[in-house]
Image (cartoon, rainbow, N blue to C red):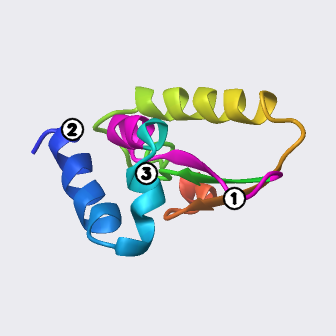
Amino acid sequence: MDKLNYYQELWEILFEAVPANEHIVANQTIKDTWMNGGYYVYELGDDTMVVSLNGMYPFYENFADPEMATTMIDWVQTVLESNTDKHFLTQTHVYFGNNWY
């Protein structure tokens, strides 16, 4: 399965199948970054953002797409630098500390 189909299938399971996630499904920016690599940012009120990262990319066992780690880190740096007036909550499914050999 290619990357786009993989993230499309996950999108349908995690977001479209859950009625409470209608606001996420309607947000094209979230869907665009999700389809690119399984990460996104969501505004939670006026002063807080949730940054959901795909911890598989910087994980040391990722041999399939190592460049995506740089793409995602560059993206999150841009998000943080362009929203200095916000608070951030981060989430990931693989702890970045797993990068130790």
Q: Marks 3 and 2: in contact by CB < 8 Å?
A: no
Q: Nearer the N terminus, badge 2 or badge 3?
A: 2
- For image coordinates 35% across by 63% down, the residue present is 15
41 to 94, vertically: above or below: above
Q: Would you call the spot at circle 2 few (<14 residues within 10 Å), some (14-19), or many (20 or more)?
A: some
Q: Amino acid at mark 3?
A: Met
> Which residue is identified by label 2?
4
Please tell me whether residue 45 belongs to the stretch shown in magenta.
Answer: yes
Image coordinates of residue 49 in percent, x first then y, are 71, 52
Q: Which residues are magenta?
A: 31-47
Camera-nearest label, 1 or 2? 1
Image coordinates of residue 19 in percent, x first then y, are 35, 73
Q: Secondary structure at mark 1?
A: loop
- For image coordinates 19% across by 55% down, the residue present is 9
Q: Nearer the viewer, residue 15 or 98?
A: 15
- For image coordinates 76% across by 36% down, the residue present is 80
Q: Nearer the viewer, residue 41 or 27?
A: 27
> Which residue is identified by label 1?
44
Q: Is residue 63 left or right of residue 74?
A: left
Q: Marks 2 and 1: in contact by CB < 8 Å?
A: no
> Which residue is identified by label 3?
56
Q: Residue furthest right?
A: 85
Camera-nearest label, 3 or 1? 1
Q: Secondary structure at mark 2?
A: helix
